[in-house]
Image (spheres, rainbow, N blue to C red):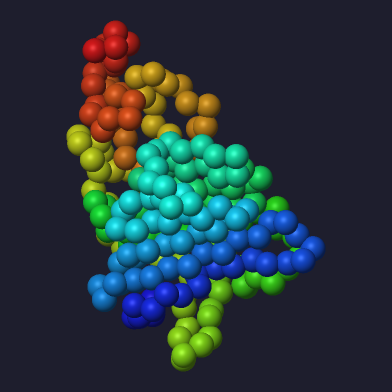
Amino acid sequence: YLSSTCYLTLSRFQSPESNSEFNINIQRDQNGHFIKIMITVDKVDTEIENGTISVDGQSISLPYDQKTIHIHKYGIFTRLQSRRGFLSVFWETQGSITDKVWVSLSKMRKGKIGKPVLIGKRRTTSRCVFGFNLVLSFFFFLAATPSCPGDMIFTETGPALPPTCSNPSPSDITETISCQCPDGKRKKDKNVICVFVYFSLRGI
């Protein structure tokens, strides 16, 4: 990646013929971690700064639902999804540090956009920004095994939405890089504690 602490454009789509427009800007610290990610979709501003998420200037908790966007945990990542389905932004935060982010696009119409790049099973967009002799690379891949909260276990192929005590059979069965409870245990809803299924069924 480009070693720069400047505020840069990561990805953008604009077209007078389409209402599927977005803008994503980032800023890194001297160690390469993201200290700020600004995502504008349908005139709604979402900012991730030092691990804290805010929408239109208001701090939020997850999951977050709004008429144009949905923000929720997705495996080890956090996902911002356009309600109209044309954009998803994923990022991974460990504590207050965010060091991985990528974008998934679909249902895009004609407009100015970077060259498509296929990475794994996801089609993303690579866009370079030229100005002040800066060139920005788009995709940042996992470099080390992430840590999982509590006694959850890291898995390269696991449920994007792990079963919980109140939702033992999630309707979304998508698999991704994830953290999951050990066999015989289930996540205690929004908590990171894994409890035995026996206690989970009894609400203990």
Q: Decide: is 8 above or below 169.
A: below
Q: Please report the residue visible at 32 percent of the width from the left and 40 percent of the height from the top.
A: 179
Residue projecting furthest to the right: 17
Q: Residue 189 at x, y = what percent?
A: 34, 25
Total count of labels: 0
Q: Quadrant of residue 5?
A: bottom left
Residue projecting furthest to the left: 151
> Which quadrant: the N terminus?
bottom left
Residue projecting furthest to the top: 202
Question: Would you say 127 lies left or right of 37 here?
Answer: right
Q: Please report the residue visible at 42 percent of the width from the left and 21 percent of the height from the top.
A: 167
Question: Would you say 26 lies left or right of 103 here?
Answer: left
Taking the image as drawn, is residue 5 in sight?
yes
Q: Please report the residue visible at 29 percent of the width from the left and 8 percent of the height from the top.
A: 202
Q: Residue 43 at x, y = what percent?
A: 60, 55
Q: Residue 35 at x, y = what percent?
A: 32, 65
Q: Please report the residue visible at 31 percent of the width from the left and 35 percent of the height from the top.
A: 180
Of 32 and 118, the residue lying toward us: 32
Q: Residue 110 at x, y = what percent?
A: 76, 65
